[in-house]
Image (cartoon, helix red, strand yellow):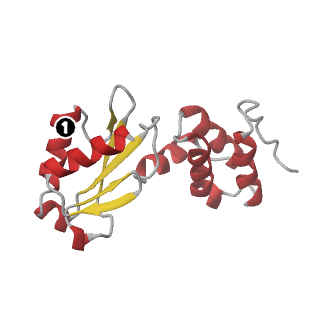
Amino acid sequence: MQRQRPELPSSDKRWKLVNATMRRNGYAEHALIEALHSVQDAFGFLDTEAMTFVADSLDLPLSKVYGVATFYHLFMLKPQGRHTCVVCTGTACYIKGAGALIEGIEQRFGVNPGETTDDKALSVMTARCVGACGLAPAVVLDGNVIGKLGTDKLVERIEQEAAE
């Protein structure tokens, strides 16, 4: 006997895309990460409603879904800003000044890693490694890897992005 699947959380068509991803994988447990990516691609972040829907659809405990969502740094549990800045904190970047970049962003924009500015203009995150050690300290600004910037140049670059 096949298990009854939960109703879509709302009539928003994006839920149909999320459900199709899980259906394509037979609502199997191994579809969890792909389902979470599908939710985030559709809605921009993972909220409790979305994680509950995925958990119920895949017949998993909510704690497992939440555990996966919080383990991987690419999943966001809150809406993100219009612009994102990911500072690499890997060994090479840390030695070359990633800490100073983070401090400069905190001072200029008043936001710590893992937070978004009050005006929703900028989200700041850190990553253990972005794979650009030769550019240390590396930053991913709105999906573009940039490197070898000092604090002043990085802040200037963020302000330029925000102005566009």
Q: Residue at x 15, y 60 (%)?
A: 94
Compared with residue 159, is residue 117 higher up or lower down, i.e. above or below?
above
Q: Residue at x 14, y 49 (%)?
A: 151
Q: Is residue 83 left or right of residue 103?
A: right
Residue 29, position in %: x, y? 64, 57
Q: As shown in the figure, which amino acid type bears the numbered disc 1?
A: Glu
Closer to us: 37 or 159: 159
Q: Quadrant of residue 51?
A: top right
Residue 115, position in %: x, y? 32, 36
Q: Is residue 104 left or right of residue 118?
A: left
Q: Is residue 78 left or right of residue 134?
A: right
Closer to us: 65 or 154: 154
Spot the residue most to the bottom: 134
Report which residue position mark 1 lands on.
106
Residue 96, position in %: x, y? 12, 63
Q: Quadrant of residue 4?
A: top right
Closer to us: 98 or 82: 82
- Alpha-carbon neighbours of circle 1 within 10 Å: few (<14), some, or many (≥20)? some
Q: Is residue 72 left or right of residue 53?
A: left
Q: Residue at x 62, y 61 (%)?
A: 30
Q: In this figure, what is the number of numbered marks?
A: 1
Q: Residue at x 62, y 44 (%)?
A: 42
Spot the residue most to the right: 1
